[in-house]
Amino acid sequence: AAKASGRGRRYLFDEALRQRLQRLRDAEHGLLRAMNEGPLQLWFQPQMDRGGRHLAGFEALIRWPHPQHGWISPPEIITAAATAGLSETLLRFVLREACDMAAVLRDMGLGHLCVAMNVSPHDVTQFPLDDLVARALRQRDLPPSMLELEITEEAVMDLKAVQEKLSRVAGSGVRLAIDDFGVGYSSLAALRQIRAHRLKVDRSFISGIGDSPDNQALLRTILSLGDSLGVQVVAEGVETEEDVQMLRELGCPAMQGYYLGCPMSRQEALNWLRHTEDVS
Ligand code: C2E
Ligand code: MG
Ligand code: MG
Ligand code: MG
């Protein structure tokens, strides 16, 4: 296929690949420094409930503006960390920054809010996640309910080891969310056993849901599943007022997306909070 597309295209492909590899290599080399010196940051995206009117907390998302390569995407950061042998360092970094944010919120009298962080299956199986989390909470005297771990449906369904470890973490009162729900394949038995607090419906089913009867039907099904399991359903990727209206109609009160709030630096998120009327 590469031959058929001719020399020019092949060159373009090689060049794009070369740049990608270069970016990854530079990311590997610069990651530790980026963590220590600050360019690597956690940004925070509001998570709403009560029909999108009320702040429930924030999801923490890694951001890295790189001097040569622009923004390095979260998946690239994760890959670079793995190649550089820095996965545990990155996990500790994210945990620390997420808990620091939770402590700031608690000190503002907002201890009912929750900070969600993403964990990879590798994080869950390879590192003492339960100890790391317990220590991070203890150091700041944080209630476990202020921290939520998000793991993708795909990861959690595939691995029994992930399920067991996460159940243990959840036993301590830390919350669990199944991320990108609807894209993977879930077994009801596993869903019940994991005792997640929330199912986050993937944004591919949510953005533009007003125009998609199929997605509306799917969300109805997930909502009734959530009801019978006692799990809150969160819609991600809410991009318009119409999305919000349809979610309210369908009875899905918890939502997240650009329309309600974009990921923001910690300082921006705290400013946003001060200007948001309903933070009680
Ligand atoms: P995710 O956990 O599903 O995060 C949601 C992603 O959707 C974020 O992309 C967010 O910026 C984006 N998003 C939020 N609202 C909207 C919307 O209304 N429309 C659209 N089109 N997109 C929206 P981001 O930050 O690029 O993160 C991508 C993925 O990288 C995350 O997916 C998560 O799985 C992973 N990730 C991010 N931070 C971390 C981290 O600290 N650790 C680990 N292990 N994974 C992370
Ligand atoms: Mg997430
Ligand atoms: Mg997601
Ligand atoms: Mg995702």
Image (cartoon, rainbow, N blue to C red):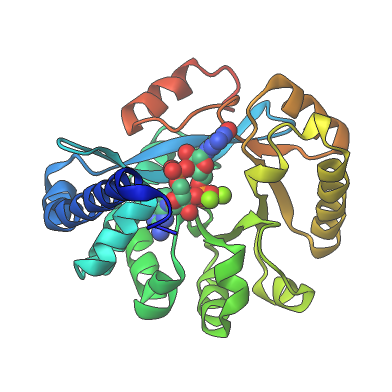
Residue 83 drawn at (x, y percent) = 24, 68
Horizontal relation, residue 219 to residue 80: left or right: right
The residue lying toward the viewer, choosing from 83 and 191, is 83
The residue lying toward the viewer, choosing from 243 and 213, is 213
Horizontal relation, residue 219 to residue 73: left or right: right
Residue 114 visible, this orientation: no
Residue 80 drawn at (x, y percent) = 25, 60
The residue lying toward the viewer, choosing from 99 and 28, is 28
Residue 166 visible, this orientation: yes
Quadrant for the N terminus in the image: bottom left
Residue 162 drawn at (x, y percent) = 52, 77
Where 180 falls versus 37 (above or below)? below
- Residue in the image at 23% along x and 64% along y: 89
- How many marks the image carries: the answer is 0
Residue 198 drawn at (x, y percent) = 66, 55
Horizontal relation, residue 130 to residue 225: left or right: left
- Residue in the image at 79% along x and 25% along y: 245
The residue lying toward the viewer, choosing from 107 and 212, is 212
- Residue in the image at 67% along x and 69% along y: 195
Where 166 falls versus 208 (above or below)? below
- Residue in the image at 33% along x and 53% along y: 76
